[in-house]
Image (spheres, rainbow, N blue to C red):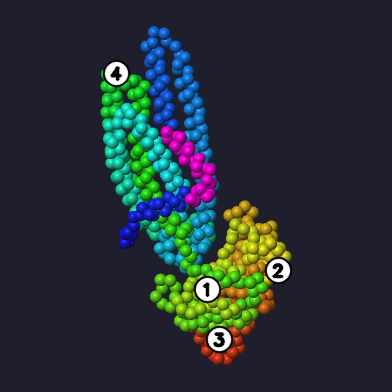
Amino acid sequence: MKKQKVAKATYKDFWIVLKWVIKTYYQIAPYKTTALLIGRFARDVNSLIYAFFFAKILDEIISIVQSENPSLDSIFPLLLSITLFSIVSTMLSQNLYNYAKRTLRNTSRFEIERLFYLKINSLGIQNLEDPTITNKIKRSWDWIYDTLNLLEELVATISSLLTVIVASIVLINIFPMLIPFIFAISIFRALPQQRFSRKMFEWQIENTEPRRKASNSSAWLQDPKSLLEINLNNSFEFFDEKFRTFMSKYSIGANRIQAKSEATNAFFNLIDEIVHLFIYIYLISKAILGTISVGSIVFTVRAAESFSNQLSSFVQTTINLYDFALKMTDLVDILSMTPAIKDGKIVLKADFTPPSIEFDNVTFQYPRAKKNIFENLNLKIKSGEKIAIVGHNGAGKTTLIKLIARVYTLQKGAILINDIDLKKIKIDSWYKKIGILFQEFNFYRHLTVQENIYLGRPSDPIDENKIVDAAISADADEFIMEYEKGYDELMSEVFKGGTTPSGGQKQKIAIARFFYRNAPLAIFDEPTSAIDAVSEYKIFNRIYGFFENKTVIIVSHRFSTVRNADRIIVMDHGQIVEEGTHDQLLAKKGVYANAFKLQAEGYKTTSSKTQV
């Protein structure tokens, strides 16, 4: 596999990401975000202030012991001060910080996830089918919950900087030469860590696509529906091997980087201990000479430790922020991405009539494809007309439907809806007027039968009578009423009290949802592939009657279901090769007649074998 080149995040990217995370979290929970910063700073500076009080108490105790008339009166104010400080600092540094952190995590994880799927929904299928964007979405999803970690790193960076300033003020007055020395050590420690962090990120980027493939293998092995075929074909080990191969390769590479990182850390920890040893020797010698008190020694050591730790923390968290910017750039890019198709401005009226549809010299090819699906295609569908589209696989039938749904942009030509260019119509306005049932339909197993049907028209109050009527039209009411809870039955056995319907039953419920929608434009794309012939016959007879005075488009490979259409369109390689009524096309003895004859003979043969 060719190694993927990883671009470095620019400082502009860095600031864009920081601005985004601050803005987002302040919109989600402004007070908790502020409390997080206050609590973190209180926690970082707390030990330094505590050391100051302790040093004063220690010096006062020594002074009392050496006094000819010892008295504890002078020590009580110091004890009271340190007690009050301890109470306040505990509330700020522990209770406030922990509360802000945990409640932010509880709240933000859902808000960020919702923000993400709202954006994905707006991008359009054309964007979502782009492998580059798909990889970005995968990485964004993997790191989406790191947004709070990014905020915590930013808060830690600000807090560390403030604490470093406080500690440096102390050290300048006591041990000024220590500041540049500790500063140099912190920088030398941070540089290799930045390098290892960068390597880990590059390793993640290189493995984005293999990780997606491994995740797909894992998903197949966790899906009860998929496992049946996998086990019957003895292919479990095949998918398991694919997952384990990726896991092994990824883990070995990641662990190698981590081992080098920890070895480097161990070396600099040794340097830190040596530095602290020299600090102790220097301060003890000063104390022996009588130029510094014991309490000052304690306070200086604590200030030096605080300065060193917080300076290292500041440098490291700054590097972490930059590394997070690399990760979060993908997420911010996705959230700032514009839809693949620019929305129109024309809002269709509430009294919208069944539409006429015209393909005017349409030329189209899929993104990243090299061959046109349609070239100068022309087709007119009258308002209220019921047409059927037939043709072999790959003829362009489903593509035609997707263009009506405005999933893709055209290279040339226009699609006119009631003489209005489709690209000028506001997409939500158009979607309210159409209903499309694809062969690969959605089935919501965590919902009840009634909810599955109701989703055909969820913007209106639920109408239970119309839901039952829709189920009857879809030949579904009979088996639904056999469920223990009827229309309130959950649609999967993985949920308590639920039932798993057959493939044909699922399709009938999806068709019932379509009947319930009752849109001015009704499009069926191979809607009965899993349904028996008898039910199919009933359903199609009801379709033609139910959608009277509607514009109807039916895509089907079964000619028995399209013979009653007002007009049948025969497609081949993206072109319309024949059109007319069923009888007209049979009379032509062309493509349609030949295919109809072959299919009819196939049904007769199947029927004879069944009888035998």
Label 3 SS: strand
Can you tell which of label 2 and label 1 is closer to the viewer?
Answer: 1
- Residue 565 % position (x, y): 62, 82
Residue at the top extreme of this rendering: 68
- Residue 284 % position (x, y): 29, 22
Q: Which mark is residue 290?
A: 4
Can you tell which of label 2 and label 4 is closer to the viewer?
Answer: 4
Please name the residue that numbered disc 3 is placed on: 579
Label 4 SS: loop
- As measured in the structure, the alpha-carbon distance from the residue carrying label 1 to the one carrying label 3 is 27 Å
- Residue 520 % position (x, y): 64, 74
- Residue 145 % position (x, y): 47, 50
Amino acid type of the residue that numbered disc 1 sits on in the rendered structure: Lys
Please name the residue that numbered disc 2 is placed on: 469
Q: Are marks 1 and 3 in contact (CB under 8 Å)?
A: no
Main secondary structure along the magenta-highlighted residues: helix
Query: Badge 2: few (under 14), some or many (20 or more) residues near its Cα, within 10 Å?
Result: some
- As measured in the structure, the alpha-carbon distance from the residue carrying label 2 to the one carrying label 3 is 34 Å
- Residue 36 shown in magenta: yes
Range of magenta residues: 23-45
Label 2 SS: helix
Can you tell which of label 1 and label 3 is closer to the viewer?
Answer: 1
Q: Residue at x 69, y 65 (%)?
A: 467
Q: Residue at x 34, y 27 (%)?
A: 300
Q: Are marks 4 and 3 in contact (CB under 8 Å)?
A: no
Please name the residue that numbered disc 1 is placed on: 423
Q: Earlier in the sequence, mark 1 or mark 3?
A: 1
Amino acid type of the residue that numbered disc 3 sits on in the rendered structure: Glu
Amino acid type of the residue that numbered disc 2 sits on in the rendered structure: Asp
Can you tell which of label 4 and label 1 is closer to the viewer?
Answer: 4
In the picture, the quarter occupied by the N terminus is bottom left
